[in-house]
Image (spheres, grey):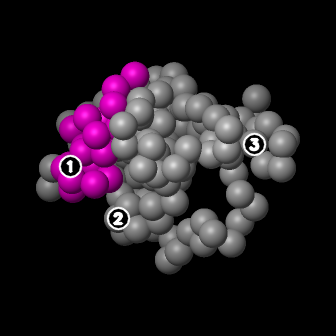
Amino acid sequence: MKNLTKQRIQITTCPCGNQQPYRQCCGRYLDEGEAAVTAEHLMRSRYTAYILDRENYLLETWHPDTRPISLQLTGQPQKQWLGLTVKRHTQTDADHAIVEFIARYKINGRAYRLHEISRFVREQGIWFYVDGDILEN
Ligand SMILES: [Zn+2]
């Protein structure tokens, strides 16, 4: 079977691996405009946004100080995302959090792992992705 279509993802388990339907998980943030309650929710929704090629969502949830102008998702070699594992979510104070995760993907049949510790900040009740450190495994 080929890639899931976007239509199909709507009724199946959320791509972020949270064992919930997409609509009740990342769909609330990607499609309904709800603010993510925690940095982990935001991180998961951003992973799902990569899968769904939702560049606008990725840019909107990126802190303005570190936000790139464009992600050019379509110009890059096509990643096939395989899964997300959230290793750690720590809220370091009221408005700062870190999320450590491993995302697995394939490019042209070759498997890769992205192991990152991401930093998040909350401003006026809204979480933003700031930046991250990529760990070598
Ligand atoms: Zn989700």
Helix, strand or loop for the magenta stretch, by majority: loop
Query: Is 8 left, or right, of 26 in this rendering?
Result: right
x and y percent of residue 15 in the render?
48, 36
> Can you identify the residue that label 3 sits on?
106
Q: For this rendering, which residue is in front, 132 or 21? A: 21
Instruction: Give the structural element (helix, strand or loop) at label 1.
Output: loop
Seen at 60% across and 66% down, the residue is 73
Residue type at mark 1 is: Ala
3, above or below 61, in the image? above
**The magenta stretch spans which residues?**
19-39
Quadrant location, the C terminus: top right
x and y percent of residue 36 in the render?
25, 43
Q: Is residue 60 visible?
A: yes
Seen at 38% across and 61% down, the residue is 57
Mark 2 neighbour class, 10 Å CA radius: few under 14, some 14 to 19, many 20 or more: few
> Can you identify the residue that label 2 sits on?
60
Instruction: Give the structural element (helix, strand or loop) at label 3.
Output: strand
| Residue farthest toward the left in the current orientation of the protein | 124
Q: Is residue 119 visible?
A: no
33, above or below 14, in the image? below
Label 3 to label 1, Cα distance in Å? Answer: 30 Å
Q: For this rendering, which residue is in front, 12 or 56? A: 12
Residue type at mark 3 is: Lys
Seen at 63% across and 69% down, the residue is 74
